[in-house]
Image (cartoon, rainbow, N blue to C red):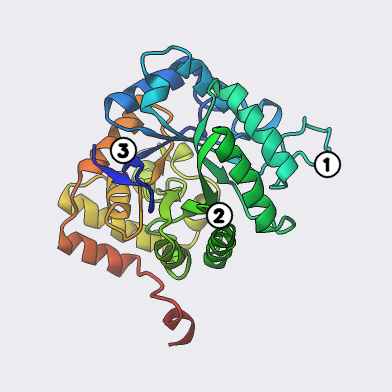
Amino acid sequence: MEYTQLGRTGLKVSRIVLGTMNFGPQTEETDSHSIMDAALDAGINFFDTANVYGWGENKGRTEEIIGSWFAKGGGRREKTVLATKVYGNMAAEGEPWPNSDKLSAVNIRRAVDASLKRLGTDYIDLYQFHHVDRSTPWDEIWQAIDVLVQQGKIVYAGSSNHAGWHIAQANEAAARRGSYGLVSEQCLYNLAERRAEMEVIPAAQGYGVGIIPWSPLHGGLLGGALRKEREGGGARSTSGRSADALKNATVRDQIQRYEDLLAKHGIEPGEAALAWLLTRPGVTGPIVGPRTAEQLASAVRASELKLGEQVLAELDEIFPGPGPSPEAFAW
């Protein structure tokens, strides 16, 4: 496993990030523990979660599963760079209540303590804002984060689903306070969805913020979706926007060209999609969300895959990027 520094920090993290969103809703606790053990054995030290994972009436369940895994000892917590998130509403289902979500100083304080309890640890390495809070000023957010850093409850702060100008606004506000600011941004970024290249990634690079792409296979679209469809395994091969995308003849043609290209080179589509992200400027590592040990093993193979210049050029032809900003908007 290769490692890199997270943004401008000195923290070393694996180039594959273990996403845990499936732990609880789709993967039982015992199997989740096995996947996390296998991840550490493979050298993956960067684990990502969120307080709302588990969803519905089970919000927080994923953090609890990670906590029970840490409780087994064996250096599990010490070896893990732990990232979780705050923003989502944690009020009981059907019982909405003010200040149970978003990024007010009150909710940040309550949410971090609740996450620490579920995770069974006394600190979080990377505490991420799951979404933009348009109602809370950055000075308030950074005041709350500075207190948590001083208390030793968190080490770094990051963002998720923020626009380029939000990253700039956040880090300029932090600089005025003498705060460290954002060190990472989780964003939707993959071969089929490259809009982040226009402004989010340049802003992140300018401020020393590491990019952590989520949905690297675009909901299964880049994981051999058409091949699985032909083989009768298409029921779980795509989801959400990707399932809808395959109804479009132009997209189907694009994905067919992609799968044909990789078949010619003897490369698995899902592994190629992950390996491509590892070649992109500013990317720390993509988040993979394995439901099984084999899916994790595939992600590890992707981290070792080196795509040749010809393959990279052909992938660019199939999935052209938007081009740099502001030229992409003007000419």
311 vs 283, left or right, is left
Q: Nearer the viewer, residue 285 or 328?
A: 285
User: Please, what secondary structure does the residue beneath circle 2 have?
Assistant: loop
Q: How many marks?
A: 3
Mark closest to the chain's N terminus, 1 or 3: 1
What is the CA distance from the residue labelled 3 to the residue labelled 2?
23 Å
Quarter-of-image position of residue 323? bottom left
Q: What crowding class fits label 1: few (fewer than 14 Cα within 10 Å), some (14-19), or many (20 or more)?
A: few
Question: Would you say residue 29 is visible in this rendering?
Answer: yes
Q: Nearer the viewer, mark 1 or mark 3?
A: 1
**Looking at the picture, which amino acid does disc 3 mark?**
Ala
**Looking at the picture, which amino acid does disc 2 mark?**
Asn
Residue 202, position as x, y percentages in the image: 42, 67
Quadrant where the C terminus is found in the figure? bottom left
Residue 307, position as x, y percentages in the image: 19, 54
Quadrant where the N terminus is found in the figure? top left
| Above or below 36: residue 99 | below
Mark closest to the chain's N terminus, 3 or 2: 2
What is the CA distance from the residue labelled 1 to the residue labelled 2?
23 Å
Q: Nearer the viewer, residue 89 or 54?
A: 89
Mark closest to the chain's N terminus, 1 or 2: 1
Q: Nearer the viewer, mark 3 or mark 2?
A: 2
| Above or below 196: residue 54 | above
Quarter-of-image position of residue 138? bottom right
| Above or below 46: residue 246 | below
What residue is pinned by disc 1? Answer: 98
User: Please, what secondary structure does the residue beneath circle 1 have?
Assistant: loop
Residue 50, position as x, y percentages in the image: 57, 36
Residue at the far bottom in the pictured view = 331
What residue is pinned by disc 2? Answer: 161
Question: Would you say residue 61 is visible in this rendering?
Answer: no
Q: What crowding class fits label 3: few (fewer than 14 Cα within 10 Å), some (14-19), or many (20 or more)?
A: many
